[in-house]
């Protein structure tokens, strides 16, 4: 039908995902097989287990993505895959599958950067995203601020100096005895909590840069908790969760809106698993209205890892002929 059909594959962490996207925005299918239940008993992702599970699940997930899209391999125009960053053993499974398909079907292979893919979830949700913009990608491994002027010009302007935002959620949740993944668990507890009942310091230097730091905040939670216990004060997990969540969102907001001002862009994009957080979405929405900024946030299901965002990012690489040779390797620390 003249549309560009791209099969996207994503295996960078603990979700085995495949999707078919037409013309970079129309999701024909978006299959995500989560390993959360498998890793929960370990309190976090176990790389070897993740890799083996990808191997078992990827073929059925790809088959299902084609079936749900109502297309066959012959209808595809390209195969796109996350090359990095991520867990090496996990990335390799997706990359090998994509290379094999591209080779057998004589299709171009498109290597996608995982963080860039997160940003492109916005292009699925809002077909008319305009450059330039600042994007805040908050995931389990990254807290990246990006300044983008075109599809081929994404510049990293800020990152975390230590823990990523999602990582901080996961670590604090673990300390509080909540289940993995920590972000959704903390969000649920926080709904019944009062942030003022467990005050936390900000610890963020309001300097020129757009870098963030969350390990100090994590330590503060643990320190304050122990202090309260020594004094025999009663601390509610709900209040700790609410205060921690509010502080993280406050820090992210300060940095993101400072970047929007500094780069004089009209639009701010959010992306990544932590952008699924309801409190974060509400606070950013209010602030954007106050400041007259156009704020875009994908629906929660497109914030967390998926392959539709990979296919969406790949579409613009397809248009400019940015194809990868079959000799590429997975890169755990792939730079933007
Ligand atoms: O983007 P993502 O699915 O995978 C990575 O690329 O890392 O992000 C996963 C991270 C985890 O740390 C998880 O705890 C966090 O996103 N997360 C949340 C929420 N949902 C997922 N954090 C806060 N609130 C949520 N609702
Ligand atoms: Zn991710």
Image (cartoon, helix red, strand yellow):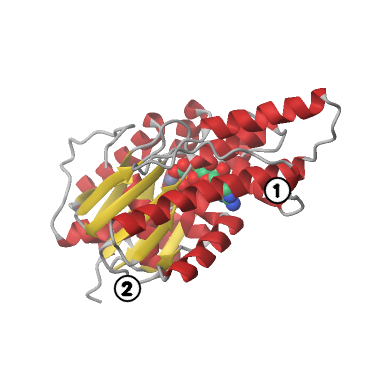
Give the position of the N terminus as an image quadrant.
bottom left
Q: Residue furthest left?
A: 321
Q: Residues within 10 Å of mark 1 (few under 14, many from 20)?
A: some
Q: Residue at x 25, y 42 (%)?
A: 99
The residue most toward the bottom is: 1
Residue at 30% over, 45% down:
157
**Can you tell me whether the CB of the residue at mark 2 lies under 8 Å from the nearest atom of ligand 1?**
no
**37, 292: nearer the viewer:** 292
Residue at position x 59%, y 37% from top?
170
**Image-quadrant location for residue 51:** top left
Residue 274 locus on image (x, y percent): 52, 49
Residue 155: x %, y % from top left: 25, 48
Please tell me whether residue 197 is drawn above or below residue 319 in the rendered image: above
Question: N-terminal of the two: label 1 or label 2?
Answer: 2
Residue 128, numbered circle: 2
**Can you give x and y, in whole percent of width and height, for residue 14 in the image?**
49, 39
- Residue that mark 1 sits on: 195
Q: Quadrant of ligand 2?
A: top left
**Quadrant location of residue 103?**
top left
Q: In front here: 2 or 90?
A: 90
Q: CA distance from mark 1 to mark 2?
A: 37 Å
């Amino acid at each position: 039908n003249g549309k560009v059909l791209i099969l996207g594959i994503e295996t960078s962490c603990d979700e085995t995902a495949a999707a078919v996207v037409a013309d970079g925005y129309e999701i024909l299918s978006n299959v995500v097989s989560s390993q959360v239940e498998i890793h929960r008993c370990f309190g976090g992702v176990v790389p070897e287990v993740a890799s083996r599970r990808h191997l078992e699940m990827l073929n059925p997930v790809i088959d299902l993505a084609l079936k749900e899209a109502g297309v066959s391999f012959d209808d595809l125009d390209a195969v796109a895959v996350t090359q990095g960053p991520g867990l090496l053993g996990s990335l390799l499974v997706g990359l090998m599958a994509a290379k094999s398909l591209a080779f057998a079907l004589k299709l171009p292979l498109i290597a996608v950067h995982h963080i860039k893919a997160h940003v492109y979830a916005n292009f699925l949700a809002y077909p008319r995203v305009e450059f330039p913009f600042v994007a805040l990608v908050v995931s389990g491994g990254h807290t990246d601020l990006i300044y983008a002027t075109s599809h081929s010009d994404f510049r990293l302007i800020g990152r975390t100096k230590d823990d990523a935002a999602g990582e901080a959620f996961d670590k604090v949740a673990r300390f509080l005895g909540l289940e993995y993944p920590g972000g959704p668990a903390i969000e649920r507890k926080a709904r019944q909590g009062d942030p003022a009942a467990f005050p936390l310091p900000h610890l963020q230097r309001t300097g020129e840069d757009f870098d963030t730091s969350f390990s100090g905040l994590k330590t503060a939670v643990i320190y304050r908790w122990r202090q309260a216990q020594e004094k025999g004060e009663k601390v509610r997990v709900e209040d700790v969760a609410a205060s921690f969540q509010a502080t993280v969102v406050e820090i992210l907001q300060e940095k993101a809106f400072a970047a929007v001002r500094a780069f004089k862009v009209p639009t701010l994009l959010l992306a990544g698993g932590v952008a699924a957080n309801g409190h974060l979405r509400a606070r950013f929405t209010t602030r954007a209205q106050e400041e007259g900024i156009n704020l875009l946030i994908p629906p929660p299901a497109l914030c967390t890892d998926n392959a539709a965002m990979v296919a969406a990012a790949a579409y613009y690489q397809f248009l400019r002929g940015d194809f990868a040779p079959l000799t590429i390797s997975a890169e755990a620390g792939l730079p933007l």
